[in-house]
Amino acid sequence: MDTKANLMTYNTFTFKTEAQMLLFRRIWEDNGTALFDKLKKKDVQDFVLIKYGI
């Protein structure tokens, strides 16, 4: 029996202000590498973040 599951999820973020968007961007810049390392250890195959401006 195959115990691995394939899962795909999409999240869409919208920002009311440019300041909120910039804060989100800053959080990713500061913490993104650590998150990707954790996901890799959990055998996440791919991760894509697409940022849209206001």
Image (cartoon, rainbow, N blue to C red):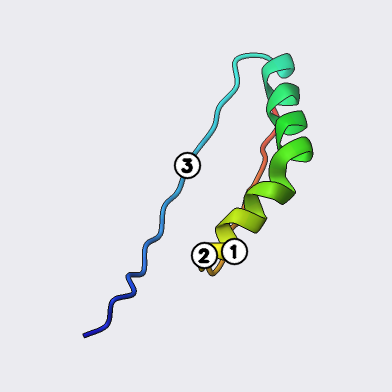
Disc number placed over residue 44 in the picture, else none: 2
Binning the other alpha carbons within 10 Å of mark 1 as few (below 14), some (14 to 19) or many (20 upward) gives few
Amino acid of disc 2: Val
Binning the other alpha carbons within 10 Å of mark 2 as few (below 14), some (14 to 19) or many (20 upward) gives few
The numbered mark, 3 or 2, whose residue comes first in the sequence reads: 3
Do callouts 2 and 1 mark residues in contact (Cβ within 8 Å)? yes
Q: Residue 2's x, y, as percent?
A: 27, 82
The residue under label 3 is 11
Q: Is residue 19 left or right of residue 2?
A: right
Q: Quadrant of the C terminus?
A: top right
Amino acid of disc 3: Asn
Q: Residue 6's x, y, as percent?
A: 36, 69
Please identify the residue farthest to the bottom as the structure is shown.
1
Q: CA distance from mark 3 to mark 2?
A: 16 Å
Please tell me how many numbered marks the rendered image carries: 3
- Asked if residue 31 is positioned above or below residue 33 in the image, the reply reads above
Q: CA distance from mark 1 to mark 3?
A: 19 Å
Q: Can you tell which of label 3 and label 2 is closer to the viewer?
A: 2
The residue under label 1 is 40
Near-viewer residue (29 or 39): 39
Please identify the residue farthest to the left as the structure is shown.
1
Residue lying at 67% horizontally and 37% vertically, measured from the top left: 52
Amino acid of disc 1: Lys
The numbered mark, 1 or 3, whose residue comes first in the sequence reads: 3
Instruction: Say which element carries label 3.
Output: loop
Q: CA distance from mark 2 to mark 1?
A: 5 Å
Residue lying at 65% horizontally and 54% vertically, measured from the top left: 36
Q: Residue 35's x, y, as percent?
A: 63, 48
